[in-house]
Amino acid sequence: MNIILFGPPGAGKGTQAKILEQKYGLKQLSTGDMLRAEMAAGSPLGVKVKGIVDAGSLVPDDIMIAIIAERIDQPDCKNGFILDGFPRTEAQAQELDAMLTQKGKRLDAVILLEVDEKILIDRIRTRIAQTAQAGDAKRADDDEEVLKTRLEAFRKQTAPIFPFYEKKGQLEKVDGMQPVEAVTAKIDDILATKKAA
Ligand code: AMP
């Protein structure tokens, strides 16, 4: 089963992806996590994207497409994958489509976690406070101004992709403001319907 999880930063995509990973034996592919790992390792790619990621802007499409094309071929994706943070632009969505067709794979579900932006800003304030309290290192993009840039990137660059999936009858909207378990239950229902189809 191959799934895309869409939602603005802070909507709970990562949390749900981890749950789906455990439940269905899928592999979560978080492009944000991959980029942060490259940055932490100080790799040439990490050095190249650091300024962009820290500012909350989007990394160029060709870089992201190459990362995903290589990643979904790995053996740990054989049962399927959950894309978390990709695609984020129309070009990425179209390339993903072409790539999957070429590899003989398909998308089983495209899920959008819908949330209220004001509540997201409150959530990130809480996350920053909790990180500080725990004495953990703060993510450079965990910052209110940067969050606003990321929300704008979501609205302007990612939201316009939704009609692409809507037209194909693939987009499933889930209220991401519900408790984690309720969101998971709704996603389970969607996946059960898709599997039965
Ligand atoms: P995330 O953890 O998914 O919110 O990603 C963190 C940051 O990584 C984003 O704000 C972007 O700078 C970058 N990023 C992650 N995925 C993508 C993508 N598919 N396209 C462009 N930039 C991305």
Image (tube, rainbow, N blue to C red):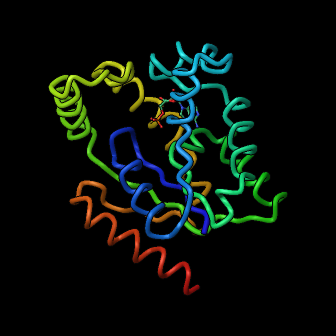
- Residue 84 drawn above or below residue 182: above
Q: Nearer the viewer, residue 32 or 169?
A: 32
Q: Quadrant of the C terminus?
A: bottom right
| Image position, residue 160 (x, y; %) | 54, 44
Residue plotted at (26% across, 65% down) = 181
- Residue 152 drawn above or below residue 46: below
Total tally of numbered discs in the picture: 0
Q: Nearer the viewer, residue 68 or 39?
A: 39
Residue plotted at (26% across, 67% down) = 182
Answer with left or right where residue 32 lies relative to residue 92.
left
Residue plotted at (22% across, 59% down) = 178
Which quarter of the picture shows residue 18? bottom left
Answer with left or right where residue 68 lies relative to residue 137.
right
Q: Nearer the viewer, residue 96 or 71?
A: 71
| Image position, residue 108 (x, y; %) | 60, 69
Q: Residue furthest bottom?
A: 196
Q: Nearer the viewer, residue 186 or 156?
A: 186
Residue plotted at (56% across, 29% down) = 35
Which quarter of the picture shows residue 60? top right
